[in-house]
Amino acid sequence: MLNIIRIKKASFYGYHGVFKQEQNIGGKFEADVDLYTNFVHAAETDKLQETINYEQVYNVMSNLALQKKFYLIETLANSMVDELFKTFASVYKIALRVRKNNPPIGGVVDCVEVEVVKSREEWKELFINQHA
């Protein structure tokens, strides 16, 4: 059975962008993540250790956003997906969106958003090819 755990509007501060001011001053970023897994056993036992801990998911994303600087939110989103697959073996597929609020693009825009959708099989194949 396939179930989905969703976390919406996870917020964190980061120093990502192509402009120096973005990398020095930083800005607010948000992420939504859909984790495709099977939590039937957890639902039956009502035990946290049988499912994916939401706090750990948030910490993986937040720590990555704070510890590294990326020029592109595309790279940030892809790195988050890779780290989530490494951390949570029971996840089959991930859809993750990252938003940069008030981007400096010379116009009035609330945010820009990118989305990465990757299955564990795709992730394994890419990981093997990158380390071959």
Image: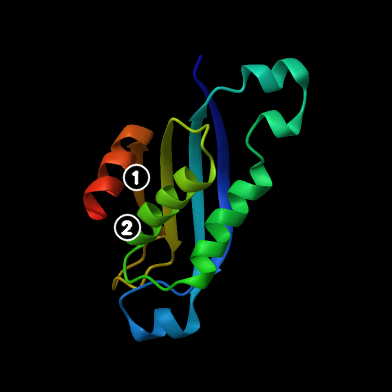
Q: Is residue 128 above or below residue 37?
A: below
Name which residue lies at 48% across and 77% down: 26
- Residue farthest toward the right in the current orientation of the protein: 46
The image quadrant that residue 50 belongs to is top right
Looking at numbered disc 2 in the image, what kind of residue is underneath it?
Answer: Glu
Q: Position of residue 7 (x, y in %)?
A: 58, 41
Q: Label 1, label 2: how many angstroms apart (C-alpha)?
A: 8 Å
Quarter-of-image position of residue 19 = bottom left
Of callouts 1 and 2, the N-terminal one? 2
The secondary structure type at the circle numbered 1 is strand
Where residue 11 sits: x, y (%)? 58, 58
Crowding around mark 1 (Cα neighbors within 10 Å: few <14, some 14 to 19, many 20+) is: some
> Residue drawn 63% across and 36% down?
52
Question: Could you tell me residue 13's position as x and y percent?
Answer: 55, 68
Give the labeled residue for mark 1: 116
- Corner quadrant of residue 100: bottom left
Q: Is residue 47 above or below residue 21?
A: above
Tell me which colouring the rendered structure shows.
Answer: rainbow
Give the number of marks: 2
Q: Relative to residue 81, is residue 53 drawn left or right?
A: right
- Mark 1 vs 2: CB contact within 8 A: yes
Q: Residue at x 49, y 33 (%)?
A: 91
Q: Is residue 112 left or right of residue 65?
A: left
Foreground of the two, 27 or 102: 27
As shown in the figure, which amino acid type bears the numbered disc 1?
Val
- Outermost residue on the front side: it is 132
Please tell me the numbered disc located at residue 74.
2
